[in-house]
Image: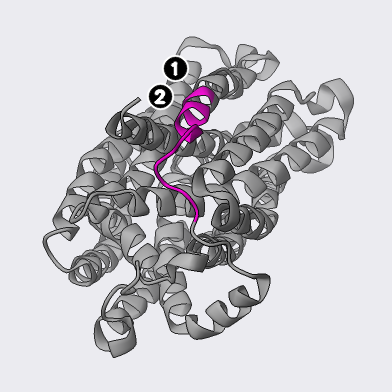
């Protein structure tokens, strides 16, 4: 097999595995209201209580993300990026199998919720390493002058997952009755992910044999502590950008079905269409942003996109809430998708480039997962709680604006600070 063909398979494996892992995360996110009905169905946990418990169950998956990021990131720095991606896929397969087979509250009481919690911990462990390993792999194996475009496919894989998840949710809500969904059809989206796992595993195994990208000299454990201390500015700036990315994915996109159905009282089926339209627009914007970032300074693209994003959030949410409708929700989602997509397409490669290559996967895992655990894991619970206690449907806008503002500050620091102005020379 030629090196070009092998690298092509490796890229497809990286994108496919990344999309699959995020598909499972996306499906759970979209099905939070249904999870509350199925696994917290006793008299004390109905309505808002069940919704809060199901968002807390969603948050469980973020507890193990930093651990998975560090373990799989360290493994990737020592044994190779692809070896780490393979291990992560196996763990994800086990988690999806558990979620597919979990008994509901009516079938086995709290046993099902416990199984879901364990599966979410395994999912978090796997996804925690997936972002760092697949991103580092895509950036490092990119041809000269194409890193921005190749790196953007990390985010594109996540968006493909959003489209696939939204499509499956739409089909399920359209062709199955509520009773059928509660009886068994809710398992089908998870089962679909389980069926795709062997295909992606075979692609990654094939690409791993004689792969062109191999690990550098394995770093000693002590070098990670020195690397962390030497790169604290890069790590802090990267965390700021990840904060803006996290609030986008877990509130603007991941929370849209729950928000539309439970807060705006719009059709669940139409809410899935809204999510799909927003994700579809990002499929065009994100690769274009990555392509553009190979020709224009990434920092300027990131700052301009985040500033536009921040300026749009408040007026769009105010306009939506003045007369809630599916049409207005589509406009809001697509407009914010264009702004956030321009940011997301460029930032992934930038935060990878500013980190030292020898410990890059581990450091990137720390940068991403520390923020995602704190901001992403509790985001839907916090927003649901804020809406419940304040009665303010603007709560998601406040939350997202705060995260994007942090990203704007980080982008300014990247432009101003001399030590952060250029990518790592040895990258």
Q: Which residue is mark 1?
A: 171
Quarter the N terminus occupies? top left
Q: Residue at x 36, y 37 (%)?
A: 11
Q: Position of residue 13 (x, y in %)?
A: 43, 32
Q: Residue at x 47, y 80 (%)?
A: 231
Query: Is 279 placed left or right of 195 in the picture?
Result: left
Residue 385 at least partly seen? no
Nearer-the-camera pick, 211 or 149: 211
Nearer-the-camera pick, 150 or 387: 150
Q: Which residue is mark 2?
A: 167
Give the vertical position of 114 relative to 68 (above or below). above
Q: Position of residue 305 (x, y in %)?
A: 22, 64
Callout 1 environment at 10 Å: few (<14), some (14 to 19), or many (20+)?
Answer: some
Q: Quadrant of residue 94?
A: top right
Query: Is 326 placed left or right of 260 in the picture?
Result: left
Residue 203's tag is none
Contact (Cβ within 8 Å) of mark 1 with mark 2 = yes
Question: Which secondary structure, mark 1?
Answer: helix
Q: Which residues are magenta?
A: 202-215
Give the vertical position of 55 relative to 73 (above or below). above
Quarter the C terminus occupies? bottom left
Q: How many marks?
A: 2
Q: Position of residue 399 (x, y in %)?
A: 46, 65
Callout 2 environment at 10 Å: few (<14), some (14 to 19), or many (20+)?
Answer: some
Q: Quadrant of residue 293?
A: bottom left
């Amino acid at each position: 097999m030629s090196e070009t063909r092998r690298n092509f398979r490796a890229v497809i494996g990286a994108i496919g595995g990344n999309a699959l892992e995020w598909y499972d995360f996306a499906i759970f996110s979209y099905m939070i209201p249904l999870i509350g009905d199925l696994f917290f169905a006793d008299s004390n946990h109905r309505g808002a209580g069940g919704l809060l418990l199901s968002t807390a169950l969603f948050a469980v998956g973020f507890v193990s993300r930093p651990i998975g990021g560090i373990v799989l990131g360290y493994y990737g720095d020592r044994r190779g990026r692809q070896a780490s991606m393979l291990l992560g896929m196996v763990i994800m397969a086990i988690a999806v199998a558990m979620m597919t087979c979990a008994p509901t509250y009516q079938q086995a009481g709290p046993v099902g919720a416990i199984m879901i919690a364990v599966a979410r911990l395994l999912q978090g462990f796997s996804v925690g390493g997936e972002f760092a390993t697949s991103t580092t792999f895509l950036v490092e194996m990119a041809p000269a002058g194409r890193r921005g475009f190749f790196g953007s496919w990390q985010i594109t894989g996540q968006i493909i997952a959003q489209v696939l998840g939204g499509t499956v949710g739409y089909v399920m809500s359209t062709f199955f009755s509520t009773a059928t969904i509660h009886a068994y059809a809710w398992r089908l989206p998870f089962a679909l992910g389980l069926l795709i796992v062997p295909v992606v595993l075979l692609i990654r195994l094939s690409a791993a044999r004689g792969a062109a990208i191999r690990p550098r000299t394995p770093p000693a454990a002590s070098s990670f502590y020195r690397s962390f201390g030497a790169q604290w500015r890069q790590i802090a700036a990267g965390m700021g950008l990840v904060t803006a990315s996290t609030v986008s994915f877990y509130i603007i996109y991941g929370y849209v079905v729950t928000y539309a159905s439970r807060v705006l009282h719009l059709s669940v089926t139409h809410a899935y269409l809204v999510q799909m339209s927003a994700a579809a627009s990002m499929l065009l914007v994100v690769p274009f942003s990555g392509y553009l970032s190979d020709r224009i300074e990434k920092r300027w693209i990131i700052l301009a996109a985040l500033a536009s994003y921040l300026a749009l959030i408040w007026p769009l949410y105010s306009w939506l809430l003045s007369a809630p409708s599916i049409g207005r929700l589509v406009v809001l989602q697509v407009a914010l998708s264009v702004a956030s997509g321009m940011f997301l397409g460029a930032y992934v490669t930038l935060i990878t480039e500013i980190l030292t290559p020898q410990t890059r996967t581990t450091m990137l895992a720390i940068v991403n997962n520390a923020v995602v655990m704190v901001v992403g894991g509790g985001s839907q619970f916090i927003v649901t709680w804020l809406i419940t206690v304040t009665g303010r449907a603007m709560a998601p806008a406040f939350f997202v604006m705060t995260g994007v503002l942090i990203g704007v500050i980080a982008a300014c620091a990247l432009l101003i600070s001399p030590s952060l102005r250029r990518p790592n020379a040895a990258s």
